[in-house]
Image (cartoon, helix red, strand yellow):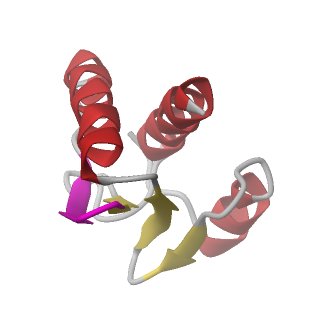
Amino acid sequence: MKKMDENEITGRLEELDGWEFKDNAIHTSFQFENFKEAFSVMVRIAFEAEAHQHHPDWSNVYNELQISLSTHDAGGVTEKDFKLARSIENIVDAGE
């Protein structure tokens, strides 16, 4: 996968609500009603990430989930990150 430059990344981020580019990755966070809902979404994202063979850097504290995506093999953000980000958005939207 080809690493995107900052202009490409910024343009693509317009397609995603609440994502930002910093520290050579794209980032977002979600808040849920409680820990159980946050963890349930994390499980669904885990299965999707495994299907993509691309895994997020993430953390969870109670009802908040923070996600960072970067393609480590490419040394930055690639199309792979945006595909997984769209899948994550679909999973979160379906759960609302």
Q: Position of residue 35 (x, y in %)?
A: 26, 52
Q: Main secondary structure of the magenta part?
A: strand
The residue depicted at 24 percent of the width and 64 percent of the height is 62
Q: Given the current orientation, which residue lies at the most extreme top position? A: 51
Q: Nearer the viewer, residue 36 or 12?
A: 36
The residue depicted at 64 percent of the width and 62 percent of the height is 9
Vertical placement of 21 versus 52: above or below?
A: below
Is residue 88 shown left or right of residue 59?
A: right
Residue 78: within the magenta? Answer: no
Is residue 13 shown left or right of residue 26?
A: right
Q: Quadrant of residue 96?
A: top right
Residue 59: within the magenta? Answer: yes
Q: Position of residue 23 (x, y in %)?
A: 39, 83
Q: Given the current orientation, which residue lies at the most extreme bottom position? A: 23
Q: Position of residue 10 (x, y in %)?
A: 71, 67
Is residue 36 shown left or right of residue 30?
A: left
Q: Quadrant of residue 59?
A: bottom left
Vertical placement of 7 versus 70: above or below?
A: below
Q: Nearer the viewer, residue 25 or 30?
A: 30
Q: Quadrant of the N terminus?
A: top left
Vertical placement of 60 versus 41: above or below?
A: below
Is residue 82 shown left or right of residue 14?
A: left
The residue depicted at 72 percent of the width and 70 percent of the height is 7
The residue depicted at 54 percent of the width and 43 percent of the height is 82
Q: Position of residue 89 (x, y in %)?
A: 57, 38
Q: Magenta part of the protein: which range?
A: 56-63
Vertical placement of 51 versus 30: above or below?
A: above
Q: Tally the numbered discs.
A: 0
